[in-house]
Amino acid sequence: MSFMTNTLKKIILKHIDKSMKNLDNRGSQTIYEFNKFKDWCQRTKTELAKMDRETTREERQAMANRFEEINRKATEYVHVLNSALRVIREMSDAIIQNIK
């Protein structure tokens, strides 16, 4: 019986470790993509500031405001993802400790 319990523990721990690694990889990739998007928003905002006078000041300001909002939401999403990853890691660590 003890052999089966130990084998089961090893299988569960291996699966949890693999799942945590996959979550870390996916989360890191998502954070990287959002940071790229945030940088793109910032560059676009800079380009809007350099835009020629074909558009009115109000139109340029409206576009800049939209990009600022997108930039803010992307930043918030990255913070939410970081928090979610932290919680998942803490929960997984607690499960591992309970199994051991």
Image (cartoon, grey):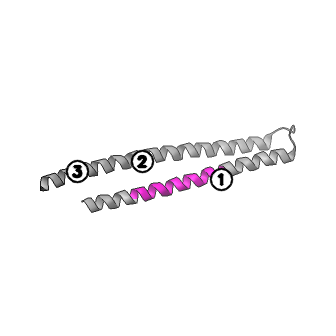
Magenta span: chief secondary structure: helix
- Residue 33: percent from left, percent from top: 55, 42
For label 3, count other residues whose C-alpha is less than 10 Å away and answer few (under 14), some (14-19) or many (20+). some
Where 48 falls versus 92 (above or below)? Answer: above
Q: Please identify, in this view, whether the residue under mark 1 or under mark 3 is nearer the observer.
A: 3
C-alpha gap between disc 2 and disc 1: 24 Å
Where 28 falls versus 52 (above or below)? Answer: below
Amino acid type shown at disc 2: Leu
Tag 3 residue: 10
Precedes in sequence: disc 1 or disc 3? 3
Q: Is residue 56 left or right of residue 72?
A: right
Q: Secondary structure at mark 1?
A: helix
Q: Is residue 21 inside the magenta stretch?
A: no
Tag 2 residue: 23
Question: What stretch of residues is rendered in magenta?
Answer: 71-89
Task: Please give the label number shown on residue 72.
Answer: 1
C-alpha gap between disc 1 and disc 3: 43 Å
Quadrant that contains the N terminus:
bottom left
Q: Secondary structure at mark 2?
A: helix
